[in-house]
Image (tube, helix red, strand yellow):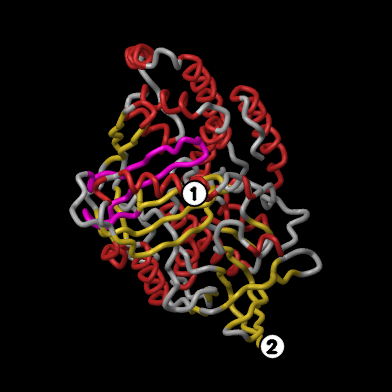
Amino acid sequence: MSIDEYDVVVAGAGTAGCYAAATIANEGLDVVIVERKDAEEAGHIACGDALKGADAFPEAIPKDRLEPAFTNTGVDHGRFEIPQEDTVLEIPVPGELAVIDRWEYGRRIISGAEDAGVEFHYDTVINDVTQTEGGRVTGLRAKRNGDPVTYEADLVIDGAGALSLLQDKADFEGTTFDTNVRYSQFCSAYREIVEVPEPVEWDDALVFKATDRAAGYLWYFPRTSTEINVGLGFQMNEEPMQLVEALKRDLRNRSEFEGAEVRDKLGAALPTRRPYDSAVAPGYMAVGDAAGHVNPTTGGGIAGAAYAGKYAGEQAVKAVSDGDVSEENLWRYNTRVMDHFGGRYAGLDVYNVLSTAVDVDDLMGLLAALPGEKLAEALYEGSTSMSFGLKLKAAVKSFGYWGTIRNFYQTKTLADELLDHYDAYPTSPAAMANWTGERDAIMDRIYETTGADAKY
């Protein structure tokens, strides 16, 4: 068995892993990314291809390296199709939007990380995590091209995706690392790249459509006016084939897809949960999907993963330079994630909780009643506010759904309280137990108000 030694070993060549590794390599440390796919397939990941925040990316991989993968930068709004209400909502989306070729994007972030000095080991399947008797993570055991190899490192960064194997293998007892993770907090996603004969009329929009079950939704994202990413997301505790049939049925009924050809098919899991309470343990950090760094209402995770990688990489450089990879010395990574987007995503997850307890027809009626710009705020910011006039207008429009709206506003009040609590995220692991206790008390009130089953 060979032994490879590095300052940092990163699991996974996705967005978070590449940005973390590039950040570290730019500071002169030895870092390797281990990736289970071969060099050709690396970067080929199931994704909706929609990128919010395309105007702001960390500098470890220059944005101009990525821009050739941005195939449609003319997208400026969401289009929500609600057949139950015979309604289409045109929703403005704040910030810069783009639809990308995800495989080309994947190749380009890998190339950018290589230029920064990152080493890549492809065809490498991780089997185990190595730890000291005291619990500090010291590396990985894997098979590279079929041959056993051990990676020894001061620090391991887990960018291995949703439901990461590393977290099943590591012993986090005695740490704050979030182990309150279940498959039902995740979503399965399936997507096809479809070439249509004629340009679609909605090539400036991200199209969403609810299925007849609240746990699923369809999307149509135009890479170009004739190349469409069509997909389906559904909670893992749902029956997949029934929901896949919903996508096929909808495609058959859309005239613009008559004569279309499927170019690619792929599926994956992604988090539809709040970010991990803590994503650090001695010698270990989790980033991106492996730490729940995804907007739980839209499934968007590219920009968040890039910044999580940046923050993890910067903290890794400090910890390795200090010769101290303790939980305490890695903690600032947690606080930066929560300050930037983690608290907001936790607030958004409250609406996922609400959706599990609301009849899908009532939920669609509620969405149809909300002013578009306010719905956009709720989807992307975690909270929204309305003037008395807008409230009155929505109330008149939504006659018959007032009970649902009352429940929504009660839930919104609690979501705002939760956001405030995340603003007080602890600055050290010592304060974590009290903070999580208070957060869980807010969540108990959310479950009581919504009537939803406990998610965590």
Q: Which residue is mark 2?
A: 1
Give coordinates of residue 368: x percent, y percent: 36, 25
Give coordinates of residue 290: x percent, y percent: 57, 57
Q: Toward which corner of the image does residue 358 lie, by quadrant?
A: top right
The residue at the point 61 percent across, 27 percent down is 446
- Which corner quadrant holds the N terminus? bottom right
Residue 24 highlighted magenta (yes or no): no
Camera-nearest residue between 238 and 120: 238
Q: Residues within 10 Å of mark 2 (few under 14, many from 20)?
A: few
Give coordinates of residue 69: x percent, y percent: 29, 64
Residue 290 vs residue 253: left or right? right
Camera-nearest residue between 1 and 115: 1
The residue at the point 50 percent across, 35 percent down is 214
Which three-letter amino acid code belongs to the residue tagged 2? Met
- What is the CA distance from the residue labelled 2 to the residue labelled 1? 37 Å
Q: Toward which corner of the image does residue 262 lie, by quadrant?
A: bottom left
Residue 269 vs residue 182: left or right? left
